């Protein structure tokens, strides 16, 4: 009899432990959510390689994200996002790892009177402009990517901390973000010997982003200001970045415009980029989009007192966006680019003298891009 009791107790204990393990696993599963996005395309350029799209075409053009959120409690969560990018024949391709941890941060939600807020610590999204947080999510973008000139291949994440507050003001709403930390800036610079890929580290990066939401025409206005210390292998210095944004959404139209000014560190850093974008919802499944980008850089040359503005890029593009199923888009894009910034060396200065600078002729190219974007 005692042996039978012991066996029964052992069976009950085993059953309890199995149930407890099942409940624990179920609880963990209930706390985890997953999101993923894929943005894959084929591109071909007409005369010059640009933005990773070569003259002979490439299918090595892809952005994939995998995000997980683990709910610690009602106010705290952990967020991690892996990123896979392939940019065709871009000189930057060799400087980008196949898989990187784009985000990895702790998020704490809190209330401050009638305002709601978030504190994020770790590798967090950087509040900069209207599209920075979704710059890799093709299913919410009219083109494959936001304007490369305005957003560049930089500042997509911040290693540090971000504090955010959103406060209703009657029918209006004010949203503010303050941040401090470091970030990376990846760029390609044309030199006398070819193109150099530069990865610069920005430290002591601090600033703020403000948004004002206006109920009329769903207007959203934004202003970003940041200061950072640029560290290279040979020198360091301070830079500033301002980023102004405006967006209006009607029932079937969206209008968007942004401008980025980046200057400082040395006289050679004085860049101004802006773009204008319009999206029309033609039918429930078809959108048409257009975009015009202007990029200008102040050209500093060796002749004392001579300065010139370089029309580095003018880009005009259009897209037809077809919704295949909810959350999945097929995009057909055509872009025309002119100026001096391509994936190949293009001369900028023909001659310089005390009288001024004579620029070399502009070059131009067209490129096409067909892409599929999906997310869940």
Image (tube, rainbow, N blue to C red):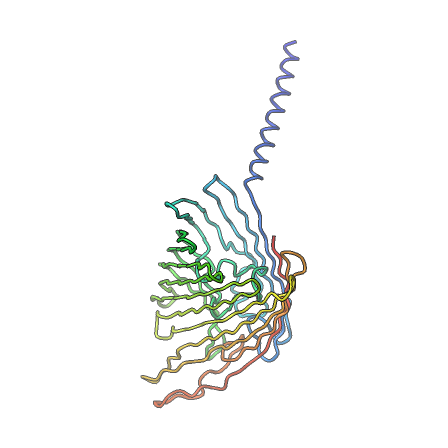
In this view of the protein, which residue sits in the foreground, 326 or 89?
A: 326
Give the x, y percent position of residue 122. 43, 50
Q: Is residue 77 above or below residue 260?
A: above
Residue 134 relative to residue 242: left or right = right
Give the x, y percent position of residue 100. 52, 56
Q: Is residue 1 above or below residue 181?
A: above
Residue 65 appears in the rendering: yes
In this view of the protein, which residue sits in the foreground, 356 or 34?
A: 34
- Residue found farthest to the right: 324
Q: Is residue 50 above or below residue 119?
A: below
Give the x, y percent position of residue 60. 62, 66
- Count of residue discs: 0
Residue 195 relative to residue 208: left or right = right
In this view of the protein, which residue sits in the foreground, 11 or 222?
A: 222
Which quadrant would residue 85 be assigned to in this image?
A: bottom right
- Residue found farthest to the top: 1
Residue at (37% x, 62% y) in the render: 226
Residue 20 relative to residue 179: left or right = right
Give the x, y percent position of residue 109. 43, 45
- Residue found farthest to the left: 305
Which quadrant would residue 55 be assigned to in this image?
A: bottom right
Image quadrant occupied by the N terminus: top right
Residue 330 appears in the rendering: no
Q: Is residue 71 above or below residue 102?
A: above
């Amino acid at each position: 009899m005692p042996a039978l009791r012991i066996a029964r107790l052992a069976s009950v204990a085993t059953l309890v432990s199995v149930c407890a393990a099942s409940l624990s696993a179920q609880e963990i599963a209930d706390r985890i959510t997953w999101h993923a996005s894929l943005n894959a395309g084929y591109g071909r350029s007409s005369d010059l390689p640009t933005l990773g799209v070569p003259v002979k075409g490439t299918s090595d053009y892809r952005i994939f994200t995998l995000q997980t959120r683990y709910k610690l409690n009602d106010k705290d969560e952990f967020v991690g996002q892996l990123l896979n990018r392939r940019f065709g024949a871009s000189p930057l391709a060799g400087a980008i790892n196949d898989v990187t941890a784009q985000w990895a941060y702790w998020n704490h939600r809190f209330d401050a009177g009638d305002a709601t807020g978030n504190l994020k610590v770790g590798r967090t999204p950087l509040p900069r402009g209207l599209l920075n947080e979704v710059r890799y999510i093709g299913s919410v973008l009219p083109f494959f990517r936001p304007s490369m000139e305005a957003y560049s291949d930089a500042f997509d994440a911040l290693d540090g901390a971000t504090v955010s507050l959103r406060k209703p003001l009657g029918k209006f709403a004010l949203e503010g973000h303050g941040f401090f930390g470091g970030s990376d800036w990846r760029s390609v610079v044309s030199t006398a010997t070819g193109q150099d890929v530069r990865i610069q580290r920005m430290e002591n990066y601090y600033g703020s982003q403000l948004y004002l939401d206006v109920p009329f025409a769903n207007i959203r206005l934004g202003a970003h200001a940041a200061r950072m210390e640029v560290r290279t292998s040979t020198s360091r210095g301070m830079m500033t970045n301002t980023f102004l944004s405006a967006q209006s959404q009607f029932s079937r139209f969206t209008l968007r415009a942004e401008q980025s000014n980046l200057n400082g560190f040395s006289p050679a850093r004085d860049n101004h980029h802006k773009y204008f974008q319009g999206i029309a919802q033609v039918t429930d499944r078809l959108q048409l989009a257009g975009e015009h980008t202007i990029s200008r850089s102040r050209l500093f040359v060796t002749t004392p007192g001579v300065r010139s503005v370089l029309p580095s890029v003018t880009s005009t593009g259009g897209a037809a966006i077809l919704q295949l199923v909810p959350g999945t888009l097929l995009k057909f894009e055509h872009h025309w680019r002119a100026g001096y910034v391509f994936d190949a060396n293009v001369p900028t200065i023909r001659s310089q003298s005390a009288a001024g600078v004579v620029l070399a002729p502009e070059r131009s190219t067209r490129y096409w891009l067909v892409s599929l974007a999906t997310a869940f």
